[in-house]
Image (cartoon, helix red, strand yellow):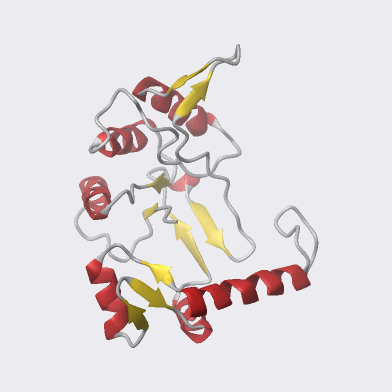
């Protein structure tokens, strides 16, 4: 594996990380706080214990084989679309900080105006290829539905490829509804948004 900015670990290091990850998934499992998700795994033959799902390496391999090696993430402006996968990689801005640090070092809660400023800066960047989501958590908005204001700002203030909200199931559905308003109802075969889940 060549050494470059994308690969800073040795092949041996990558194998060790992979083996440890597979051991954690197999022996420790993952907790899912969503009954439908656990039931989906269970109905597909995965071992479960309450809301914990145990995942074998062959299941990970099978899932990876079902995903495209590379895909184009479309922007509203086609010239800003980004290829993801293969040897391609895309820079995306930060995600989720609750505070803003002023030039003098003073820290304060972030507000929606800060979010919009960060979005504008990202839009003008030649380095960042995708609009982020949740550049910060706006303290001046109600937490339960602040994602709607952030989504609206993202799709109206930038034509770069779009990062949607995965805060919960409703936020993900609202993201898809917003995409349908922009691109029309038939979006199932298009790659129009990405989301961060961890």
Q: Which residue appears at 27% of the width and 84% of the height?
A: 43
Q: Which residue appears at 70% of the width and 69% of the height?
A: 14
Q: Which residue appears at 75% of the width and 57% of the height?
A: 8
Q: Quadrant of the C terminus?
A: bottom left
Q: Which residue appears at 37% of the width and 20% of the height?
A: 113
Q: Nearer the viewer, residue 86 or 45?
A: 45
Q: Nearer the viewer, residue 30 or 70?
A: 30
| Figure check: 143 above or below 178 | above
Residue 159 in picture, x, y percent from top left: 40, 38
Q: How many marks?
A: 0
Q: Quadrant of the N terminus?
A: bottom right
Residue 134 in picture, x, y percent from top left: 40, 38
Residue furthest to the top in view is 104
| Figure check: 192 above or below 162 | below
Residue 154 in picture, x, y percent from top left: 36, 36
| Figure check: 131 above or below 169 | above
């Amino acid at each position: 594996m060549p050494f470059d900015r994308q690969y800073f670990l040795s092949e041996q290091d990558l194998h060790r990380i992979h083996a440890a990850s597979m051991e954690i998934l197999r022996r420790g499992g993952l907790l899912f706080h969503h009954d439908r998700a656990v039931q989906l795994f269970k109905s597909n033959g995965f071992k479960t214990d309450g809301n914990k799902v145990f995942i074998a390496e062959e299941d990970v391999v099978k899932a990876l084989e079902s995903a495209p090696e590379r895909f184009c993430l479309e922007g509203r402006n086609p010239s800003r679309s980004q290829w993801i996968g293969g040897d391609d990689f895309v820079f995306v801005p930060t995600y989720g900080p609750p505070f803003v640090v002023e030039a003098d070092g003073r820290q304060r809660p972030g507000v929606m105006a800060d979010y919009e400023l960060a979005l504008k800066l990202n839009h003008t960047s030649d380095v960042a290829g995708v609009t982020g989501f949740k550049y910060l958590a706006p303290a001046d908005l109600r937490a339960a539905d602040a994602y709607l204001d952030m989504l609206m700002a993202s799709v109206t203030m930038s034509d770069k490829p779009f990062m949607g909200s995965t805060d919960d199931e409703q936020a993900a559905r609202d993201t898809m509804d917003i995409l349908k308003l922009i691109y029309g109802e038939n979006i199932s075969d298009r790659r129009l948004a990405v989301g961060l889940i961890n």
